[in-house]
Image: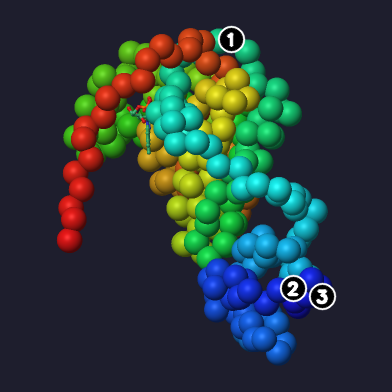
Amino acid sequence: MLKIADSCIKCGACQECCPSVAIEVTREKGPVLVSDACIACGHCESICPVGALEKTDLLHNEDVPLDKWPVLDARTAELFLRARRSIREWKPGIVPRTQTEKLLQIGRYAQTGSNMQGIDYLVVESPEVMDELLVLLTEWFRTHPDPVRQETYQRFKDEPRRFFRGAPQCLLALHDPATPKTFRNGQFAFTYVELYAASLGLGTCWAGYLEAYLNTNDAASRKLLGIPEDRVVCAAMLYGLPKYPYHKLVTRNPAEIHWR
Ligand SMILES: Cc1cc2nc3c(=O)[nH]c(=O)nc-3n(C[C@H](O)[C@H](O)[C@H](O)COP(=O)(O)O)c2cc1C
């Protein structure tokens, strides 16, 4: 339901921004819900310049009124994004759960298809489970028929911890395979996690090898990790306390842009 305060100026912004074309604004009636296709994204509420609109069926416990939309200036944003690095060297120590929770909470604000969200997280913080996971992963590579996997195995077999870059812990994003659209949501969430990590004094590295193995969804890893029955892994990330800071920004290939 829409609750509209008298302060509504009927500007039409809520109608324009609604992804579901669920709101219509007229001079006579103001904003009216015209469809039940709302995806609960909250755009209508947050674009309202006078705070006159409330969608009463949404959660509101985390709402924060903004005096000014907090946008980084372009140079700061560029430096922030370019300074993100994959961390592969770690200080000893386990990240406290409070920090891990802060890190994962940010993932909830990443974009998701149709605002479906639908991501759970699994944190592996036990060194024993990390070790057992490494054993399973190494065996998967050892017996894999693909020559590329074989080549990786040959490179890593004498020091299998390189599969995890010696990371003490890892994060897994889980989704419900019955809603395949949510698979990518875990990856978007971890992109947020990765960008936020440095601000919490943490480092992350995407765990592609681990992800490839866990995507097999085999019974051994499911049992070891206690993955809930209706969930599968959609993204994996190593994390911990970074050992070194970085001292320069690097160059990437120029963007190939095709204009039409
Ligand atoms: C999907 C994905 C999987 C990755 N898997 C691994 C991995 O298993 N091990 C690793 O050391 N780095 C992994 N990386 C990190 C890339 O090597 C890294 O992003 C790339 O070299 C660029 O470095 P940067 O992230 O520091 O800019 C992965 C990155 C992505 C996006």
- Residues packed near mark 1 inside 10 Å, few (<14), some (14 to 19) or many (20 plus): few
Quarter of the figure with the C terminus: bottom left
Provide the residue designation for mark 1: 92
Residue type at mark 2 is Cys
Q: Distance between the residues labelled 3 and 1?
A: 58 Å
Report if residue 210 is visible in the image.
Answer: no
State whether residue 35 is above or below residue 213.
below
Task: Look at the numbered discs 3 and 2 and tell me whether their residues touch, using CB distance below 8 Å.
Answer: yes
Task: Look at the numbered discs 3 and 1 and tell me whether their residues touch, using CB distance below 8 Å.
Answer: no
Give the number of the disc on residue 8: 2
Q: Distance between the residues labelled 2 and 1?
A: 56 Å
- Residues packed near mark 3 inside 10 Å, few (<14), some (14 to 19) or many (20 plus): few
Residue type at mark 1 is Pro
- Residues packed near mark 2 inside 10 Å, few (<14), some (14 to 19) or many (20 plus): some
Query: Does the Cβ of the disc 1 residue fall within 8 Å of ligand 1?
Result: no
Q: Where is residue 149 in the image (x, y as percent from the top left)?
A: 26, 33
Q: Position of residue 199 (x, y in %)?
A: 59, 26
Residue type at mark 3 is Asp
Question: Quick check: 196 left or right of 245?
Answer: right
Question: Which residue is at a point 48% across and 47% down the rendered structure image?
Answer: 188
Location of residue 226 by image quarter: top right
Location of residue 29 by image quarter: bottom right
Report if residue 15 is visible in the image.
Answer: yes
State whether residue 127 is above or below residue 13.
above
Q: Of helix, strand and loop, which one carries label 2?
A: loop
Query: Does the Cβ of the disc 2 residue fall within 8 Å of ligand 1?
Result: no
Q: How is the image coloured?
A: rainbow
Question: Which residue is at a point 68% across and 62% down the rendered structure image?
Answer: 49
Provide the residue designation for mark 3: 6
